[in-house]
Amino acid sequence: MRALIHQTFGSPEEVLQIEDRPLPEPGEGEVRLRIVLSPIHNHDLWTVRGQYGFKPELPAASGTEALGVVDALGAGVENLSVGQRVATGGTFGAWSEYLTVNAAGLIPVPDSLPDESAAQLVSMPFSTVTLLHFLDVKPGDWIVQNAANGAVGRMLAQLGAARGVNVVGLVRRTAGVDELREQGIERVVATDQDDWKEQVARITGGAPIVAGVDSVGGSSAGDVLSLIAEDGTLVIFGAMNSPTIEIASSDVIFKHTTVKGFWGSKVIPQLDPALRGELFGELVQRVTDGTLTLPVAATFDAADISEAVQATNSAGRVGKVLLRF
């Protein structure tokens, strides 16, 4: 079977190569999946660079999320059938033609979901709806986020609106405001405008912003914190531009701000199974009724991984880049 492997850590478009690997056999409680589509996430690329919270042994497989079709059943698997579509997230080695996984962790995909949506349902959407739960906000509350035109930013705005939570988004380019408006996402402000803080105040009408999400790092984290009201919470979700955050001590001290980290790989396993099922059900409902959109920027054959990574890193990209096996 074909699989994307890297022999060294480095730039993904340079070190990832298609290699032939033996067809895996499912063990007890496992199934073998034939991978249909797999998205490229930022954390996948950081892992290939050797700069993520998880560092695999070399030579290493790659990819973490996929839509697959059950191809073979291991002993003791009774809740799935050969030919069934399933989604998997957080499964290392997803960038391959076939993959063996624990059957208990798979999510059956309803017929109403197209392949392109199902392929990206777990990692980012589920992390986003879990983040919204983690923020502990209620209908009518105001929150702010940067990277509003990123995948998580778009989804947080849509899921927040569906729950009655007011979300203000920050983008770095004025053009990003129009891009989001075209998708029906309002309440977006570009920080390249001198009066961006005043624009935020006009949007909220002076209502307190109780929480903020930073996915960028650097001084952008401080921009988010500067907007949060007293006794608010700043959640560090990502580090798109910088591995460090720059925040004002005065904002933390005098506003009594709580600063937390959020890593889905840590938070999601700690969720009560009933709550996890409830959140997944919400996601499927939102995608099915169009409340939550999961656009696709482009789809590439796995052999064209270099071009796929370049497309992922392109400015102004809307939607995920998918790999086909």
Image: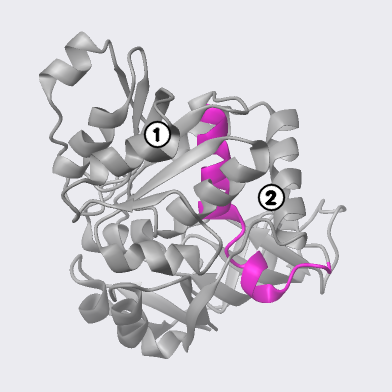
Which corner quadrant of the image does residue 106 belong to?
bottom right
Mark seen at residue 92: none
Whether 83 is among the magenta residues is no
Whether 125 is among the magenta residues is yes
Tag 1 residue: 262
Q: Nearer the viewer, residue 207 or 294?
A: 207
Image height of 196 relative to 46, above or below: above
Say few, some or many: other residues with alpha carbon within 10 Å of mark 2 (under 14 / 14 to 19 / 20 or more): many
Q: Give x and y (percent) for residue 80.
A: 83, 59
User: In the rendered structure, which amino acid carries the disc numbered 1?
Assistant: Phe
In percent of the image, x 19 and y 10: which residue is there? 254
Q: Give x and y (percent) for residue 67.
A: 64, 68
Image height of 223 relative to 41, above or below: above
Point out the stretch of residues depicted in magenta. Answer: 111-134
Label 1 SS: loop
Mark seen at residue 283: 2
**Given this view, does label 2 or label 1 mark the residue nearer the observer?**
2
Q: Give x and y (percent) for residue 257.
A: 29, 16
In percent of the image, x 32 and y 26: which residue is there? 228
